[in-house]
């Protein structure tokens, strides 16, 4: 049984939870529901 | 195993691109699922996309970091990095082989009958440079007068965005065609280049230019799911190396950062020397089912 992957997963899980705690998913949702034409090379 | 992988790839393609009402609504999906980061490279401006592209999201967050911090919002990419890190530390580049729609696109192109060529190994390093420069440093530091950075990789390079978002948007909204300029022409040439290259070489974008693949590759030594080569069973026939779509000799380097865990080596190995392990525990079911199809294992030399 290797423990390292679980430690790394735990660290990133912590990062994700902090991100959720500061309401970053709402920003991601807002960004991903808008078409950014400049971002895909149009306009 | 190859058939199972194709089904999984198709499943992830449709899960990531499941909004088929777009020809009628003429816009992209705007529902709550877009808060989820897709594991593979899948442009969220694609009309059918149901999830967010993690590479696009991280660039947008880093590009807007000054503005959001000034307004007291701590949007620095922790949620996206955390989600990507969990996927990376669990599966690593297995995502490239099993769940990436753009990887599937390249695999299908590579089935076109043609002479096949290997990719120069030094080109592998380019994707790490693109990850650091166009995904992190340039969005963060190359800012305009308002302190806002651009998503450099999406804007100037990403062929997946051109294919999945740029071209469909031009088809759906003809008025946009008048706004096309040099930038879109450059991106179209990049897409065309990788498309043609994928016919002749296996997964050229994944291996040379994908920043998401580069990020997942960082976990190759610590990820939960690993390949394991049993030295006492390996007879050195190199069948695994010849079957590998990304030119890795798995018998010498089972934790190679380029390995996409497609398991072609495990299926090909007649002596059953290649096994899958999860968290250090051998997962023998997969290799046993492969050997049942290809016949009994040869005795070790």
Image (cartoon, coloured by chain):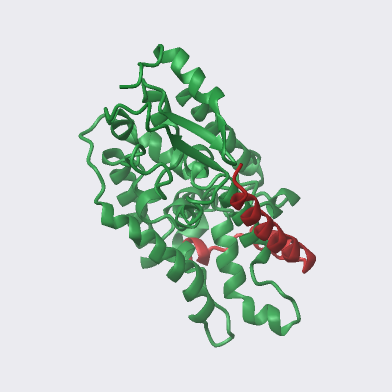
Which of B186 and A27 lies nearest the eye of the viewer? A27
| Image quarter of residue B273 | top left
Could you say which quadrant of the image residue B116 lies in?
A: top left
Up the image or down, B16 lies above or below B240; here it is below
Answer left or right for B127 relative to B238. Answer: right
Residue A24 percent across, percent down from the top left: 72, 65
Left or right of B283 in this view: B166: left
Quadrant in the picture for the C terminus of chain B: top left
x then y, percent, for residue B275: 47, 30
Q: Is residue B218 visible?
A: yes
Query: What colour is chain A?
Result: red
Identify the residue at horizontal 70%, vertical 52% (top origin).
B30
Q: In the rendered picture, chain B carries what hue? A: green
Residue B209, given in percent of the width and then of the height, sits at 38, 56
Looking at this view, name the residue that lies furthest to the bottom.
Answer: B145
- Judged from this view, the residue extending furthest toward the left is B115
Q: Nearer the viewer, residue B141 or B181?
A: B141
Q: Determine the residue positioned at 48% across, 57% down.
A: B218
| Residue B100 visible here | no
> Where is residue A8 drawn, in percent x and y?
62, 56
Q: Residue at x 56, y 23 (%)?
A: B285
What residue is at 50 percent from the left and 59 percent from the top? B176
Residue placed most toward the observer, B231 or B287 = B231
In the visual, does B1 lie left or right of B232? Answer: right
| Count of picture labels | 0
């Amino acid at each position: 049984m290797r423990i390292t992957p679980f430690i790394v997963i735990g660290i990133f899980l912590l990062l994700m939870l902090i991100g959720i705690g500061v309401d970053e998913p709402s920003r991601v949702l807002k960004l991903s529901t808008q078409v950014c034409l400049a971002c895909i090379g149009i306009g | 195993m190859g058939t199972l992988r194709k089904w999984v790839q198709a499943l992830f393609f449709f899960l990531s691109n499941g909004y088929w009402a777009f020809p009628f609504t003429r816009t992209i999906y705007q529902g709550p699922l877009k808060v989820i980061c897709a594991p593979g490279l899948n442009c969220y401006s694609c009309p059918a996309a149901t999830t967010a592209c993690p590479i696009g999201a991280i660039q947008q967050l880093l590009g807007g970091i000054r503005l959001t911090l000034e307004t007291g919002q701590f949007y620095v990419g922790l949620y996206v990095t955390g989600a990507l890190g969990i996927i990376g530390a669990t599966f690593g580049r297995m995502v490239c082989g099993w769940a990436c729609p753009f990887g599937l696109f390249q695999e299908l192109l590579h089935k076109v009958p043609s002479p096949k060529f290997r990719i120069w190994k030094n080109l592998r390093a380019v994707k790490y440079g693109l990850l650091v420069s166009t995904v992190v440093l340039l969005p963060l530091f190359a800012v305009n007068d308002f302190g806002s950075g651009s998503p450099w990789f999406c804007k100037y390079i990403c062929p997946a965005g051109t294919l999945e978002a740029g071209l469909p948007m031009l088809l759906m909204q003809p008025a946009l065609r008048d706004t096309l300029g040099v930038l879109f022409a450059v991106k179209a040439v990049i897409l065309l280049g990788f498309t043609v290259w994928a016919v002749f070489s296996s997964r050229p974008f994944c291996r040379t230019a994908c920043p998401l693949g580069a990020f997942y590759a960082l976990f190759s030594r610590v990820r939960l799911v690993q390949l394991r080569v049993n030295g006492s069973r390996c007879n050195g026939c190199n069948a695994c190396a010849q079957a590998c779509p990304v030119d890795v000799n798995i018998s010498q380097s089972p934790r190679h950062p380029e390995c996409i865990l497609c398991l072609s080596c495990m299926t090909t190995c007649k002596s059953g020397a290649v096994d899958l392990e999860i968290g250090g525990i051998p997962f023998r079911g997969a290799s046993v089912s492969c050997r049942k199809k290809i016949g009994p294992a040869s005795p070790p030399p």
